[in-house]
Image (cartoon, rainbow, N blue to C red):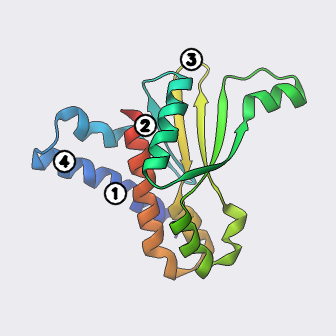
Amino acid sequence: MKTLWTLVALFLVLSASAFAQEDGNMNDEAASMHSHITVNGYYLHTAVSTDFETTVEKLRGILKDEGFGVLTEIDFSAKMKEKLDVDTPPCLILGACNPPFAWQVFQSEPWIGVEMPCNVVVRQMDDGSVEVAIKNPGMLVEATGNNELSQLGEDLTQAVVRILEKVSH
């Protein structure tokens, strides 16, 4: 089942890109933006062309536009410096929540709260580039074993793909 959700997420990304290219409604850059999203099992991620601070600011606006609020914020780099005296490139973990989605899931699967909020990670890589990763909602729904949540998992995955598309361009 884990493989199924990963394939569903990848299919959504690839089919949207293929449709856009065949339909001719998007320019080449817009049509290719789907190819910048990578599915890695429990998360989806993309590289961005902006610096760390700009990416964080842009991401906050995109999350809001998609109906997500930021409930928690962890400056991972600062915590590692404080607790372990380790220097790391900037890394921020945002705990995002879309209340309508959260409520739908919670009504059917109350223990889903152990996985809430949805973590969104903005990370500056060692080479100076910046990447954004978001928990794969399809994997989360699959982990519940609750088939009632299948459509919701697909809807959430589409929202995550949209967020990553917007932040990467």
Residue 167 is labelled as 2
169 horizontally vs 40: left or right? left
Q: Locate the C terminus by quadrant.
A: top left
Looking at the image, can residue 139 be seen? yes
Residue 88, horizontal then vertical, whole percent: 73, 23
Among the two numbered marks 4 and 2 on one chain, the one whose residue lies closer to the N terminus = 4
Residue at 56 percent of width and 18 percent of height: 128
Q: Amino acid at mark 2?
A: Val
Mark in the foreground, 4 or 2: 2
Q: Secondary structure at mark 1?
A: helix
Mark in the foreground, 2 or 3: 2
Contact between labelled residues 3 and 1, with CB atoms less than 8 Å apart: no
* Residue labelled with disc 4: 20
* Residue labelled with disc 3: 127
Q: Amino acid at mark 1?
A: Leu
Among the two numbered marks 1 and 3 on one chain, the one whose residue lies closer to the N terminus = 1
Q: Secondary structure at mark 4?
A: helix
Q: Secondary structure at mark 2?
A: helix
- Residue reaching furthest top? 127
Among the two numbered marks 1 and 4 on one chain, the one whose residue lies closer to the N terminus = 1
C-alpha distance separating marks 1 and 3: 30 Å
Residue at 19 percent of width and 34 percent of height: 28
C-alpha distance separating marks 4 and 2: 19 Å
* Residue labelled with disc 1: 12
Question: Which residue is more in the foreground, 134 or 64?
Answer: 64
Q: Amino acid at mark 4?
A: Ala
Among the two numbered marks 2 and 1 on one chain, the one whose residue lies closer to the N terminus = 1
C-alpha distance separating marks 4 and 3: 32 Å
Callout 1 environment at 10 Å: few (<14), some (14 to 19), or many (20+)? some
